[in-house]
């Protein structure tokens, strides 16, 4: 990707988010891969080293000890991971009131760590846990401490503690879906960053936005399932793009 292309993309991006308010952004795994978090389905994705069956609800319920043994250090222990340039960019432009809502398919909490507010997590958060019996919430550190002496973390009431993520076989949280649908309906610009748009219902939200008159922008290297209906596509490496936009913002200050 030539620098001149990134310059143009960056300038167009800033013009769009300034003029087509309000702005809703949907982010996928590509936003976090630059932070060192592997995606699930890519060439170096988790499914190459962990069976997809591990992320099924039935597997967790039947084999909670095995689930925690496999995933605790590979999925949940992400506290030391730093946000990518894209996380930082979205937090910064939201602080400047240029974007309103971030909808994410990711479970890593890096948007919040970067400082973004109004984050809608479609698939939950790998740093949060709760008791399946009494719904008491637990932090990652509390669960990790329990696992030092217990093969399976149990609540004080005796219930099984589970991660607050959406397993295969579960419905996405209704509240998150409702909020994401509302943000999609009411935006003037809908942006997708780092997602191939192959997973539903996340891929429905751009359609909702388009049907309500929004401009649809995709920023993603490689093909997505909705390229053919986008108003504009920036086919570029996301981290380089975000760094370029950040530089443009410094020039404007």
Image (cartoon, rainbow, N blue to C red):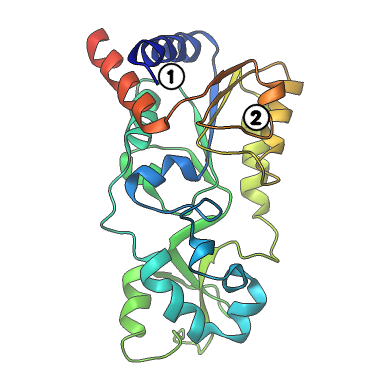
Label at residue 98: 1
As rendered, which of 10 and 135 lies closer to the eye?
Answer: 10
Relative side of 133 to 237, left or right: right
The crowding category of the residue bearing disc 1, from other C-alpha atoms within 10 Å (few below 14, some 14 to 19, many at least 20), is: many
Q: Position of residue 177 (x, y in %)?
A: 66, 45
Residue beneath label 2, please? 184
As rendered, which of 224 and 103 lies closer to the eye?
Answer: 224
Label at residue 22: none
211, above or below 163, in the image: above
The crowding category of the residue bearing disc 2, from other C-alpha atoms within 10 Å (few below 14, some 14 to 19, many at least 20), is: many
> Which element is circle 1 on?
loop
Q: Position of residue 207 (x, y in %)?
A: 73, 29
75, above or below 21, in the image: below
Q: Position of residue 13 (x, y in %)?
A: 45, 15
Residue found at x 70% / y 45%: 201
As rendered, which of 149 and 50 lies closer to the eye?
Answer: 50
Residue found at x 67% / y 43%: 198
Q: Quadrant of the N terminus?
A: top left
Q: CA distance from mark 1 to mark 2?
A: 16 Å
Residue found at x 49% / y 73%: 136
Q: Position of residue 12 (x, y in %)?
A: 46, 10
Residue found at x 38% / y 16%: 6
User: Which of disc 2 and disc 1 is earlier in sequence?
Assistant: 1
Q: Quadrant of the C terminus?
A: top left
> Which element is circle 2 on?
helix
């Amino acid at each position: 990707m030539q620098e001149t292309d990134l310059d143009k993309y960056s300038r167009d991006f800033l013009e769009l988010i300034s003029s087509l308010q309000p702005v809703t952004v949907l982010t996928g795994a590509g936003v976090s891969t630059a932070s060192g978090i592997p995606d699930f389905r890519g060439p170096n994705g988790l499914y190459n080293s962990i069976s997809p069956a591990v992320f099924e609800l039935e597997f967790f319920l039947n084999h909670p000890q095995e689930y925690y043994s496999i995933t605790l250090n590979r999925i949940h222990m992400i506290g030391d991971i730093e946000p990518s340039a894209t996380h930082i960019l979205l937090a910064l432009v939201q602080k400047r009131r240029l974007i309103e809502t971030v909808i994410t398919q990711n479970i890593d909490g890096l948007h919040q760590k970067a400082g973004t507010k109004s984050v809608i997590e479609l698939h939950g958060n790998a740093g949060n846990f709760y008791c399946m019996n009494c719904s008491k919430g637990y932090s990652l550190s509390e669960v990790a401490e329990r696992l030092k002496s217990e093969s399976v973390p149990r609540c004080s009431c005796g219930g099984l503690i589970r991660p607050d993520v959406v397993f295969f076989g579960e419905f996405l949280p209704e509240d998150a879906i409702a909020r994401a649908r509302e943000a999609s309906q009411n935006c003037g610009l809908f942006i997708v960053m780092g997602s191939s748009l192959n997973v539903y219902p996340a891929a429905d939200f751009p359609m909702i936005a388009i049907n309500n008159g929004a401009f649809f922008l995709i920023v993603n290297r490689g093909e997505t399932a909705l390229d053919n209906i986008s108003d504009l596509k920036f086919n570029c490496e996301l981290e380089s793009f975000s760094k370029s936009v950040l530089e443009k913002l410094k020039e404007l200050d």
